[in-house]
Image: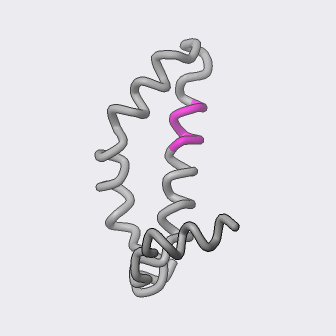
């Protein structure tokens, strides 16, 4: 992963901490046998999102989002 284009590995841990509460809630709704697998899958999904996000790109405006919906 290129730090300049797609986020950074260092950010991954920060994002995990940010979503820790949500992850914990999801895990409590899952059987004990499945919790570790779900936790790993959620971490993978967060990592993939960070990797595929271009943080240098400007946030879209409200109207550009509306235009993409049509």
What span is colored magenta in the figure? 37-42
Q: Is residue 4 left or right of residue 64?
A: left
Picture residue at 60% right of the left edge, 31% below the top: 37
Q: Residue furthest right?
A: 70
Q: Is residue 38 magenta?
A: yes
Quarter of the figure with residue 8: bottom left
Q: Position of residue 21 (x, y in %)?
A: 33, 32
Q: Residue 35's x, y, as percent? A: 54, 23
Nearer to us in this view, 52 or 41? 52
Give the residue drawn at x 49%, y 73%: 63
Q: What color scheme is it?
A: one colour
Vertical placement of residue 44 versus 68, above or below: above
- The C terminus is located in which quarter? bottom right
| Relative horizontal placement of residue 54, taking residue 45 as reference (left or right) | left
Q: Report the label total.
A: 0
Q: Position of residue 22 (x, y in %)?
A: 39, 33
Residue drawn at (32%, 66%) of the image: 10
- Residue furthest bottom in the image: 4
Seen from the viewer's position, the closer of residues 30 and 66 is 66
Report the residue that reaches farthest toward the top. Answer: 31
Q: Within the magenta stretch, is there residue 67?
A: no
Most foreground residue, 32 or 60:
60
The dominant secondary structure in magenta is helix
Against 46, residue 62 (above or below) is: below
């Amino acid at each position: 992963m290129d730090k300049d284009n797609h986020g950074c590995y260092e950010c991954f841990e920060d994002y995990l901490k940010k979503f820790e509460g949500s992850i914990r809630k999801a895990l409590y709704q899952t059987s004990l046998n499945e919790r570790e697998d779900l936790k790993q899958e959620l971490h993978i999904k967060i990592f993939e999102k960070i990797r595929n996000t271009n943080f240098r790109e400007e946030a879209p405006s409200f109207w550009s989002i509306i235009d993409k919906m049509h």
